[in-house]
Amino acid sequence: MKNKFHILLTGLVIAALMVSACGQATTAAPTTAPTEPPPTAKPAESPTEVPAAPTEVPAPEEGEPYRIGAFFSTTGPVSSLGQPEWGTVIMLAEGINGDGGIMGPDGKLHKLDVRKYDDQSDATKAVEIAKKLVEEDKVPVIIGGSGSPASIAVIETVTNAGVPFISVASSSLIVTAADGTQNHWVFKTPQQNYPVALVQADWIKAHNITKVASLGVNNAFGADSMAALKRVAGENGLEIVWEGTFEPRDTDFSAQLTAILGTEAEALVVHATPGEGAPLTVQFRAMGFEIPLVHNHGIGNQAFISTAGADAEGVLFPIGKLLVADQLADSDPQKAALLQYQEEYIATFGSKPSTFGGHAWDAMMMVVDALKAVGPDSAAIRDYLETKLTNWVGISGIFNVSAADHTGIGKESLVLVEIKDGGWVYVDPADYANVP
Amino acid sequence: MKFSFGQLAVVGLVAVIAAAPAIVGNNYQVFILTLIGLYTMLTVGLSLVMGYAGQVSLGHATFYGVGAYATALLSARAGWPSWAALIVATALTGLMGFVIGVPIFRLRGHYLAMATLGLNVIFSLILKNEAGITGGPSGFTGIPPLAVGRFVFDSDVRMYYLVWTMVLGSLWLSLNIVNSRVGRALRAIHASEVAAETLGVDANAYKLRVFALAAGFAGLAGGLYAQAVHFISPSSFDILVSVELVTMTAIGGLASVWGSVFGAATVVFLGQFIRDKMALVLAGASGEQEIIVFGLLLVIIMVFLPEGLTAGGLKLIRRWRMADGR
Amino acid sequence: MNYEVFIPHNSSFINSTMSFTDQLAQYLISGITQGSIYALIALGFVTIYNVTGIINFSQGEFAVIGAFIAITAAQKVLLFQGQVTVGLEWPLPVAILAGVAGAVLVGVLLYRLGIQPARHASPLSQIVATIGASIALRGLVLLAWGTDPYRLPPFTAGKPLKLLGAVLTRQGVWVMGLAAVAVVGLYLFFQYTLIGKALRASSANPGAARLMGINTRRMGLIAFALSAGLGALGGIVIAPVTFMTYDRGLMLALKGFVAMIMGGLTNPFGAVVGGLTLGIVESLAAGLISSGYKDAFAFAVLFLVLLVRLGGLIKRGSGEALERAGL
């Protein structure tokens, strides 16, 4: 009796799934997607009102909303990256929709309909979500993938479906295929780890340091960053005297730090995100190290400073220009965009933006530009992304995307920053030898 | 010819499974159903181990991972044909289950639970640290799809049918075991090992065989997963996945073969439901709600409905009806 | 919040390589510090096991919850992804008390709602139920506090001490001291107080204890409350050194359990020795052998201990008598 019931129930469950699937496949309205309705923060404008778009009379008509697919890791080990990314995308979408939407190539205004999901830092769920976005939400373009494994996992799905995907994760494996060519449908906005290591090496050489220790988090980001450092060390005659790892979200590093104390390392290079980087810095100081501490671009947010407190003083790391936007020369082409993003983010969330959110900003605005130019056509969007993003001013840098380079930014987009008095201070390359 | 209700129900289920892709109509739903199939294969093995042999296994994802990585290494690195890689990986995983079972089954209760957990932790760390072999935390890409002769299983629908054929096979095999002498021996062991041994049942041998079989199922599921998604990474095989599998087994009923289908389906759909609907409640993130719901579910089932959601629910209904005097 | 800080020199950096013996001393000290929290968790395990025969997989969560409540009471904290601001900022001792009290409350609730109803279930069900409880608790902590690491200020400010060429933070002294006080206190409690003796009686022979008028159910409750408090203390005292995150609980529980087995399951002193040994082994192995496998060493130790204990015994019969004997 029990068994038959099980069988019946299972059949019913599957039947229910199929019925609901039929329902979703035919309706255009999002019944299952957890989207925000067009802005609730601003006073609701009914769709028939004239939007405040800067066009002349007669006011443009409104067309179908443009869909954008998005997935980030807002829970799980990568959530400290996923949450600012998610927040940035929502903020931008609400802002655009509040202005009435974007002007498509058909001369009509289109609001943005962002279908966004949380992949819980899990690659399998990322694949599920990608398939859902492609098959059910029928989006013409996807952004996201906070963690490198999630981004890598969906490459196959987006390629088979012919949908362009802009990743916000940093591993070079996302855009570069095994044979060295760039994955046709995949782009990414964060810098590679290699140029970050180059900036670190510049500073290291300025101090005539030849021996370093390398300590990184044992995940895709850390592994890729450590490999980049190794490569740069080989090219610059630096010796990595000690190399080790720690688990993601671990906060006790006494064993690794003790081992480093026994080596001849003249500097410690750390590859971590704020969750581990801050506790590590605190323990580093507590153990009485006298060598300098250099991080990578994983600690580009306020949480690092507030968690590590006074121990963060003197930490150096290469990062995009966002964190020192107000210290840039007025002639810097990025300054205006950086300051505006900072202002909007603080107004919306009450805290300073991080570079992670910046990567999401870049991905989102690239998609917006593409939609404005070619509308919701996957192949056309892909071509636009590959060919039209030249000297494109973004938050992470000034992008020059090409068929040979689906990332588009490199060492020139990075600056070295020192944490001083609880804030970030830009370090001019000429000053490397004097800092900290 | 008269068919029992049970037999008709099975035929009905098989028909539903066969027709599902056509009715569902999109690859995403087909993929979800394929995942349910894989989890079913994992869960049925676990229910044999936990329900019939009465052994706690909190590291079942280890075998899932071994099957996946073995298939990946054999087909993508060593260049073996994908069907050979799959078969050998499955056999290897089963063998590994047997070998590990020998020392492990000398343990009881909590020690067994800890030992299986420890196995999983060590396995995860090996996957992450030995990047030269496994690709490390960045994962292993480029796994070729299963190909038998000219026929390549490179679409969601084809993999769906392949996986579910295997699932039905594993269910049939498990049912045969349960209803055979072996099954009776297992139930005797579960009830009282001492009594069973006095009756001449070699408890250890039976437990080992069941464990090896479950490991084999898990290995097969892992290989199929690798060939369906073409990318594997360590986070898909860690202790959290093992606990998820235990949850599926518990929901379906610890000692129920058909329950494993139900348990797997419920967990997957419940997860989706939480993600889609309840995510609206708190700022768009759903991972926390999922964790809480599954944790609570596990406690409630273990405490009040140890035979699983359906059987336990049935019992409650029966008791309620009897109390009404009907 | 003023933390002591060392700022590196602005000039050329001095190469002060630590000698190997100094390094060993450092591994030892760090290992004992970390091992003390394993010891406190293990003590909680032992307490519950001694009285109720249950292994409580949620033991680690008490450390996390206790620490987070203390942190919330001591500082300005944003909960529920920034939607709720808590600005209690109580003095540290009060905050610590609040943390312990909060964890004890959770322990009591867990017992009444989860463990007591399950006491007639099979051991398998009980194990899985406590696992489920630990998952649910972890989810709740995640919901409230998010994924960031949080910290308490060290109990006493001041520069770290130098001991045998190694660095010992002042908080490290607190950690070790607390573990020592806890084990001695627990021993005295079980040996000389009425409740302690009642607890021991309930574990040795529940039937006889009940005949003597001891409410065994309440004993279980007290055991849970006690071990929740111990766990919370462990989490709180270690938070200034190694921070606290929402998912620390599982690994703490696993390692505490290993420590308990090392110490012989029922012996509190053994649990503490086990915890300290485990911490030292982990520290040495992670530093000298491989940092990537740090978490694996605890399980390697577990397998070793189980192997040693199983060696030479005939495997027959159901587990209970053997379990009590430490297998």
Image (cartoon, coloured by chain):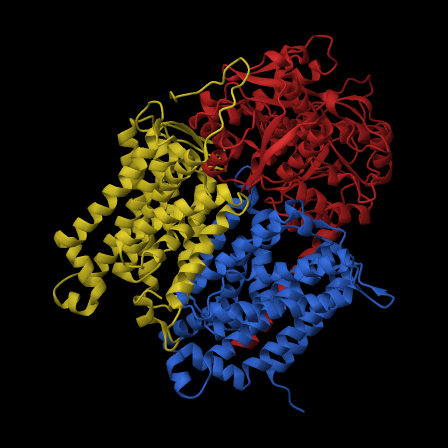
Residue A370, image x, y percentages = 81, 30
Which hue belongs to chain B? blue
Q: How far across and how far down the image is residue A396, in percent?
A: 70, 24
Tell me the quarter of the image containing the N terminus of chain C: top left
On the rendered structure, is C172 left or right of A46?
left
Residue A358: % across, % down: 66, 26
Q: Position of residue A136 (x, y in %)?
A: 73, 49
Relative to C193, B180 lies left or right: right
Is A134 situated left or right of A206 in this image? right
Residue at the extreme top of the image, as rendered: A330
The answer to which of A374 and A221 lies nearer the viewer is A221
Colour of chain A as rendered: red
**Res B202 seen here:** yes
Going 80% across and 62% down the picture, which residue do you hit? B153
Residue drawn at point x = 22 percent, y = 57 percent = C219
Which residue occupies 73% across, 63% down?
Answer: B160
Name the residue nearer the viewer: A418 or A383: A418
